[in-house]
Amino acid sequence: MTPSLFKRTSMLPSFLSASLLFAGTALSSPFLQSRATNLSPAININFPDPAVMQDTDGTWYAFATNGNGKNVQSASAPSINGPWTVLNNDLLPTVGAWSNGANVWAPDVRMIGSSYVLYYAATDAASTNQHCVGTATSDTILGPYTPRSSTIACDVAAGGAIDPSGFTDADGNHYVVYKIDGNSVGHGGSCGNTVDPIVPTPLMLQQLEADGVTPSGDPIELLDRGDADGPLIEAPNLILVNGVYFLFFSSNCYSTTLYDISYATASSVKGPFTKSSAPLAVTGNPFNLTAPGGATATTNGKNMVFHANCDAGRCMYESAITVSGTAVSFS
């Protein structure tokens, strides 16, 4: 199928309405009054929900939601700062048997032992309105990856599961964080979930066995949306810096100017997580970008990639970040 410009396709309010709402918020929020910095795309094609990792030879790789004729897009660079070269590989030409093979979203690759593990979401074959999270493995970073026949997260009744991101803790334990896509079974409004009763969209933590693909125990909830988050939170990404766990996520509806990059912190991988007092990035601050979101930080907490609206759809952007205690800022 021809992939749509945007990841979700629920009925949404007009761009103009969202823009006016954002403008009102901007005038009253001290967070939004610093001067915006221009930032050019690191990858100037439709490359949403980007994830990055550095391979053993020092090369950096980026991965993105389906598009440009591929289930999983990829790019490479000699440095996290680029220059980035879009690759012709489809890392996942065959999706797991549990899926109908459509709408592969938000891939993330981690090296576990001597194997590369790809986490991804795709449409569930039995319930085509919901996604599940699956895994695939390869001996090389660019694959092709061999999908496993079972999922690691698939709560269809709650809305399914999307936006997986791998994490290895200081003690060597492996996890994947993901979103329960509750707004996909919401009752209407922005991103399908601003009409009462509002459906939860929690970010979950699933511990994995040493292979990085087999679930160990039950998932636990790390964080859920609140009134300030609009219809949802999503796109979780977890890192550990100087004993502090940072859970990055996006809130509000991805197709409006209210979409953002936010974060929460904890002293334990299982929480409790406390949301920061202000988002890390919103439309117009700190960059002159619209609807920044879908962020992934490097494991050392020094750089971040994310998408924002561009002429091609949603391009990948990259910037240095600074971590100080429990605070994060773009450098």
Image (spheres, helix red, strand yellow):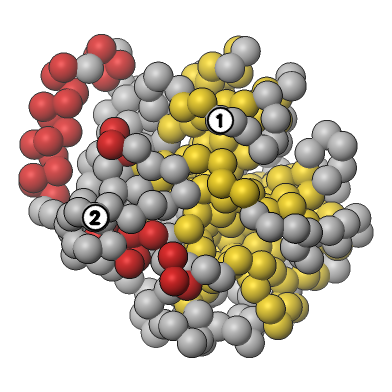
Judge the density around disc 2: few (<14), some (14-19), many (≥20) Cα neighbours within 10 Å: few
Badge 2 amino acid? Pro
Q: Position of residue 269 (x, y in %)?
A: 69, 35
Badge 1 amino acid? Phe
In the shown orientation, is residue 300 left or right of residue 4? right
Q: Which residue is mark 2?
A: 197
**Residue situated in front as seen by the camera: 40 or 229:** 229
Q: Residue at x 78, y 59 (%)?
A: 216
Q: Residue at x 77, y 70 (%)?
A: 137
Q: Is residue 271 visible?
A: yes
Q: Residue at x 83, y 34 (%)?
A: 170
In the shown orientation, is residue 181 left or right of residue 144? left
Say which quadrant the N terminus sits in: bottom left
Question: Helix, strand, or loop for circle 1?
Answer: loop
- Residue 149 badge: none
**Residue situated in front as seen by the camera: 254 or 40:** 254
Q: Which residue is mark 1?
A: 273
Which numbered mark, 1 or 2, is in the foreground of this view? 2
Q: How many marks?
A: 2
Question: Helix, strand, or loop for circle 2?
Answer: loop
